[in-house]
Amino acid sequence: MCGRYTIINLSRFTDLFPWIRQPETPAPPRYNVSPTQQVPLVVNSAQPRIDFAQWGLVPSWAASGGRPMINARAETLASKRTFKDALRKRRCLLPADGFYEWKTTQGGERRPIYFRLKSGKPFAFAGLWEGSRVGGELAKTCTIITTGPNKLVEPIHDRMPVILMEEDYQRWLDAAEREPEDLLSMLKPFPGEEMEAVEVSKAVNSPRNQGPECIEPQEKGSGFGVGGSGEEPTLF
């Protein structure tokens, strides 16, 4: 599952991939992106650009106010009515630079863990989008595709979001209709050796908290350049 993530500097993402047009208005940093919020995405069109959609896909055939689905399992995309048409026709990238999962201790306490690339570079989740009726209005909605965990995520959770390899971005964004067999090989766990993880502040537990305190490492004096000393964070 992927239920929270960050996109702290959207312009870094578009700088890395200049063939994707930036939004006209600079996007603010997002340290605690949560379900049902508007999120940046790149849909599969002839001229890819940053757009925005509600996180939580509502199928176009669902009644207005249908239950939004924030995640879609890669293994069943091609067979589920909710997703199979979108897989063929309506794919998207969701820019990010990290995501959260929660580790449950033996005492039942849930501790947030922040995952990101060791390089510090932004990346993109594989997603699907729809034109949906939300509250009676036509709007875009989207979902993040998940797969099995890599070795870094596995001790924390049995699922992880699909982080696409950079060389697959344009293929995933092909505006043409594609068969599932042309796409499913891209939906695999990202290499764990290229990622790192650190326990962070419980501030992220509340969607009301949206500042850099959400990624503040639990171990004082370590961090990713958000007020720490620059020492190595506690890794999992």
Image (cartoon, grey):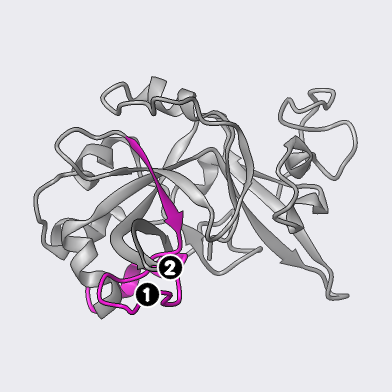
- Camera-side residue: 11 or 151? 11
SS under mark 2: loop
Find residue 44 and report its image quarter: top left
Residue placed at 66% from the left, 63% from the top?
156
Q: Residue furthest front?
A: 136
Residue type, numbered disc 1: Ser
Q: Which residue is mark 1?
A: 64
Q: Which mark is residue 154?
A: none
Query: Mark 2 and 1 residues: CB-CB less than 8 Å, in contact?
Result: yes
Q: Is residue 226 magenta?
A: no
Ranked by sequence position, the earlier of labels 2 and 1 is 1
What is the span of residues highlighted in magenta in the rendered image? 50-79
Q: Which mark is residue 135?
A: 2
| Picture layout, residue 17 above or below residue 116 | above
Find residue 46 and report its image quarter: top left
Q: Position of residue 88 (x, y in %)?
A: 16, 61
